[in-house]
Image: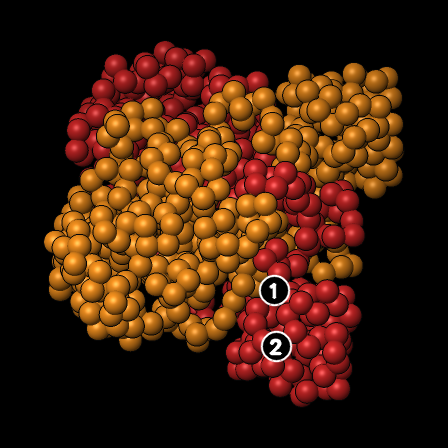
Chain colours: A orange, B red
Amino acid sequence: MPEQALSDVRILDLTQYIAGPFCTKLLADFGADVIKIERPDGGDPARRLRPFFKDEAHQEKSGLFLYLNMNKRGITLNLKNALGVKIFKELVRQADVVVESFRPGVMARLGLDYETLEKLNPRLVMTSISNFGQTGPYRDYKSSELILYGMGGEMYSSGLPDREPVKNAETVSLYQVGAAAATGTMGALLGSRLQGIGQHVDMSMQEALTAAAPDRKSTVMIAYQFCGEIHPRFPGYETGYPYGAHPTADGYVEIFGGRAYWSRIVKMLGEPEILKDPKWLEPTAQANPALKEEFEALFLAWSMERTKRQVMEEGQAARAPVGAILTIDEVINDPHFNERGLFIEVDHPVVGKLKYPGRPFIMSETPFQARRPAPLLGQHNEEVYGELGYTGEEIARLREWGVI
Amino acid sequence: MTKLPLEGIRVVELGVAWTGPCAAMILADFGAEVIKVDTVNFWQTQGRGMVARPTKEMLATQTPHSGGYPNKEPGEYPWNCWPVFVTGGRNKLSMSVRDLREPEGREIFLRLIKISDIFIENNHPDTMPKLNLDYEVLKEVKPDLIMVRSSATGLSGPYRDYRAHGSQLDAICSHSSLRGYRDMDPSANTPVFITDYLGACFSALAAMMALNYRRRTGRGQLIEVAQVETGAVCLGEAMMDHSMNQRVRTTQGNRDIHGAAPCGCYRCAGEDRWVNITVTSDEEWQGLCRALGNPPWTQEERFSDARSRYENQDALDQYIEQWTSQRDHYAVMHLLQKEGVPAGPVMDARDTYNDPHLKERGFLVPVSHRDCGNYLHPGAAWKLSKTPITIRRPPVRFGEDNEYVYKQLLGFSDEEYAELERKGHISDGPAPHIP
């Protein structure tokens, strides 16, 4: 197999659920040897989360787990066992990175805090992902995807003004945190590689959602200080038009119009006579509710005669930012994504061949590879402990002692 | 002095809106020397503003994140103060060039590429070829260049030429079909931009991975981040549910897709104040009951176990909201967390600004900016123990580092610099004819 960008990187992955495993998956996708370390009793709790293959709850059939842990090797190790801790330290000596997502303080209680591990491996990078970080008054507070999104600052301005704010879909915020965690870990790893500095990376999910790769949420925070205004909650981007989701004959399209794209929007609509009136170009036109109402009625009459894909195509032909709101099945069968090879087939010993989302980005020299499916619980115990020098008999004994 | 992780790495940025600028900012935060190239005679919409010189009247009608210039005034240098630009503008340098479409501008740009390691751009796929600055061309000048191209829908495929902001990509990757109120259609949704965030992270991540490879092999490469795909790969549960069960998921609103109940957003005392609560176990349910003072309804059979709470969530939500609506959103968080129940306020910008936890962690970083004044910039997501991320330079002003870049890096003499100035390359803002 061709060399990958991170073929020379070994990562010990103590993370569970979604954000941490997505972080290490991104690194594994581009060649890192990620060793996923799971509790012997049941492993990563994500193994018990839906969706399950044919809706059958089974620790090797969670689609979430299978997706987030592909390209990793998997071992079991009991870190509450003194021998387990000793073996983990042996692994640390040969690793470049440790990523963990326990509650703050757990690693220290296990005797595995960064200060201890650094002595074994001075160039080690350790990333700790937690709800609110390793310090501060909320350090030990519990959280959820919904709560983190709300405390990240964007939720307040999402939804209708007279109703409760509404969050992003599914567990998207945790994936965003995972993407940020991989980025921060990679930065620290280069610090180790280029400057010889190992260090601990404390990552708060709340802060990651407020700022890691800033988007609207950090911008509204800056704008608030500049002008004193709180970003209002309403279904649009600006007060002008057309913005947001609009109905068509068979679904919705999402439009970004307003002043900047007005001439393109008019072109998309076939340059009707009524839109040639100079009133539409007056400086206050975009802020005029009566004009907005008039425009929206005209738009609706046009869009309801077309499918969402037709509206998207006619909009794009006029270079107007218009996107059809596709459903999951439409995305999976979409010609664009399929021609580009976004989806891949992965063969797994229990669930067989299935379509997965593939590479997150394209690297011309060191491409994404689907090297292996997600590990069965403890699948690589013999292999990994064998590499550490344990014989088959010793590994069997570790199992008897409840270490692995 | 401890060296920052990317000290010694030089990055060129031709970014617009969020993805490209924020990707470059991440590299700058880690210590790279990032040079943003600003053009004097060509205005890039959403580079440093929707327009170069907005009027006060225009700003008055705009939402804060696009119209929220300091005091809602365009000021003398509006291109240095657009909140979107300011967001991703820290720790960078800026040089100005008259116009990259002209041979001389292009030559200057190539001189910069020759001494750089990474080039990040997030323009339409046609832009670089039109400027004759495609990877194949740049590779001739700088053979081990790492070039990151992050366009909306990628460099190939039927949608390659699509014009889109994050909200269109949110639609096309199906995120929009999976979010929003459970009882409303998507027209009630506010546009969100998850692919800006993800595209920025992935662009920076990929560039750093490529640096690791280059360090080993001496080879550069071309990286393509199709922003729409960055959204698609973050919908794992929904994608796999379709793969495994042919199920087409729709929105669950604020409910937990993995079945924790109650899970929702509840009204609090005060104007437009809200709190999120998620109960994931019997222990947390008992904690919630304690915090609420064990009212009789908590003993009802229909709330007695995880499944019945999940099935009777609407009724449960009403009881919970009766309690939260009497209390401050922060007070609810502290009361519930004390009993081990996950809860947190829906924070608006004021809350973020005043939050004691973020304050104690030093998350918001004081910045003093010539044109924007003093304010707190949201920090980085990573607290690095030995090379902490700091704001070494405030969001960069147009052409702020011309002298340094032209003379020290590109080797132009004082006379040549004066000539460049005369020709209109050296400027602290876009040309006067640009509206």
As drawn, B89 above or below B334: above
Q: Amino acid at mark 2?
A: Trp
Quarter of the figure with the N terminus of chain A: top left
Mark 2 lies on residue: B285
Which element is circle 1 on?
A: loop
Q: Amino acid at mark 1?
A: Ala
Identify the chain of the residue marked 1, using the numbered disc in the image: B
Quarter of the figure with the C terminus of chain A: bottom left
* Residue A20 in the image, given as x and y percentages of width and height: 40, 54
| Horizontal side, residue A271 vs residue B286: left or right | right
Q: Would you identify the image quadrant in which residue B274 lies?
A: bottom right
Measure the alpha-carbon separation of dots 1 and 2.
10 Å
Q: Nearer the viewer, residue A103 or B416?
A: A103
Mark 1 lies on residue: B260
Q: Is residue B61 visible?
A: no
The disc label shown at residue A116, or none:
none
Q: Residue at x 83, y 41 (%)?
A: A289
Binning the other alpha carbons within 10 Å of mark 2 as few (below 14), some (14 to 19) or many (20 upward) gives many
Please say if the residues under marks 1 and 2 sit with CB atoms less than 8 Å apart: no
Identify the chain of the residue marked 2, using the numbered disc in the image: B
